[in-house]
Image (cartoon, helix red, strand yellow):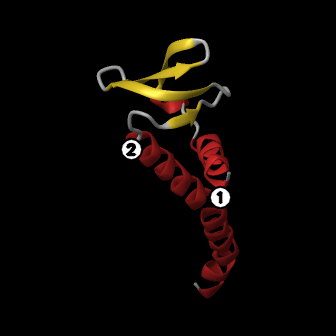
Amino acid sequence: MGEGITSLLPIIAIFAVFYFFMIRPQMKQRKKEKSFSENLKRGDKVVTKSGMYGKVLDFSDKSNTVILETGAGKITFDRSAISLEMSEKRNSKKEDN
C-alpha cells in the first residue's frame, strides 16, 4: 500500500507545479482582463489587440461592443478586442510625460 502512494507522489508534484506555474497565472490574467473590460468608461484611451488606438465614445451592452473614436472615424469593436496590456502601456507613457 505504501509503495502505491510513493509512486503517485511524483505525478502529484508535477501536477502541483503545473498548476501553480501555468494554470493559476492564466486564470489571474483572464480575471484581470475581464475586470478591465467591465470597468471601461467613456473617454478612456485604449488600444485594441490589432493595434488600433482610440478613445471610448459609447457602449452597447446588448451586443457587448464598444464604439471607439479613432483617426479613421468611429469604429465599433467587440469589448474583448480591447487590449489590457497595450492600453496600460499607452496610458502609463502619457502619465510619465
Farthest left residue in view: 62
Q: What residue sits 55% from the left and 52% below the top? A: 29
Asked if 28 appears above or below 61 in the picture, the reply is: below
- Relative image position of residue 9 (x, y in whole percent): 65, 77
**Left of 40 or right of it: where is 61?**
left
Mark 2–mark 1 Cα distance, whole angstroms, equals 26 Å
Mark earlier in primary sequence (2, 1): 1
Residue in the image at 35% along x and 20% along y:
63
Q: Image point 47% across, 24% down: which residue?
A: 78
Label at residue 84: none
From what the image shows, is residue 45 above or below residue 10?
above
- Horizontal and vertical percent position of residue 50: 66, 26
Q: Is residue 31 left or right of residue 70?
A: left
**In front: 65, or 16?**
65
Residue type highlighted by circle 1:
Met
Report helix, strand or loop for mark 2: loop
Q: Are marks 2 and 1 in contact (CB under 8 Å)?
A: no
For numbered disc 1, what is the local secondary structure?
helix
Disc assigned to residue 39? 2
- Number of numbered discs on residues: 2
Relative height, residue 60 to residue 18 (above, below): above
- Density class for disc 1 (Cα within 10 Å; few <14, some 14-19, many ≥20) is few
Question: Percent x, y for residue 52?
Answer: 64, 25
Residue ID for mark 1: 22
The disc labelled 2 sits on which kind of residue?
Asn
